[in-house]
Image: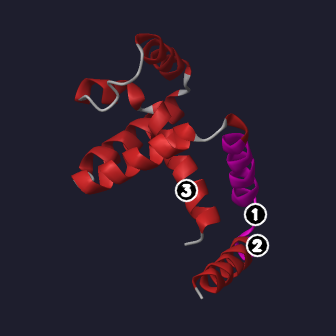
Amino acid sequence: MSLFVTRYLVGIAVVSGILTLWPLRESGWAQHLSEGTIQQIKRDWRDLPPRERSRALENYQRFQKLKPERQRDYQERYHRWLDLPDNERDRLHQNYRRYRGMTLDEKEEFDRKSRRWRDRRRD
């Protein structure tokens, strides 16, 4: 998988993770968050439509079922995501939305070019 696609997938995981951080506090994972941040997340959670809440909860439940090393991997990716400047996160979101809007043929072409680019970088 190319770095480009990996970064977007990390972005998806992060967004899903942000939507589910409130229960993580109870598990101790989000202890570094301030009380104000926790309250904002709870407010955001209450404002989500039921469908998005359900999706976020499913993502959280899948996360809980992962092996500890995979959970740590996602946590590290999340922290790297948080360390990105806002403009970089915005750029990644924009590119991900563009990727999501592609047709299947366009995605396949993009993936083919990404693999070729990645393989050239390895040489």
Above or below — where is 107 with respect to 100?
below
Looking at the rendered image, the disc whose residue lies closer to the viewer, 2 or 3, is 3
| Magenta portion: prevailing SS class | helix
Q: Residue at x 31, y 49 (%)?
A: 71
Above or below — where is 64 with respect to 2?
above
- Judged left or right of residue 8, residue 75 is left
Q: Which mark is residue 12?
A: none
Is residue 110 a member of the stretch shown in magenta?
Answer: no
* Residue nearer the viewer, 77 or 104: 77
The span picked out in magenta is: 88-106
* Residue nearer the viewer, 94 or 78: 78
Mark 1 and mark 2 residues within 8 Å of each other at the beta carbon = yes
Helix, strand or loop under label 2? helix
Q: Residue furthest bottom?
A: 123
Residue 30: x and y, percent? 35, 28
The residue under label 1 is 102
Q: Residue at x 46, y 43 (%)?
A: 78
Say which label, 3 or 1, has the lower sequence index: 3
Distance between the alpha carbons at the discs numbered 1 and 2: 6 Å
The residue under label 2 is 106
Above or below — where is 86 with respect to 33?
below
The residue under label 3 is 9
Q: Amino acid at mark 2?
A: Glu
Q: Amino acid at mark 3?
A: Leu
Residue 33: x and y, percent? 40, 22
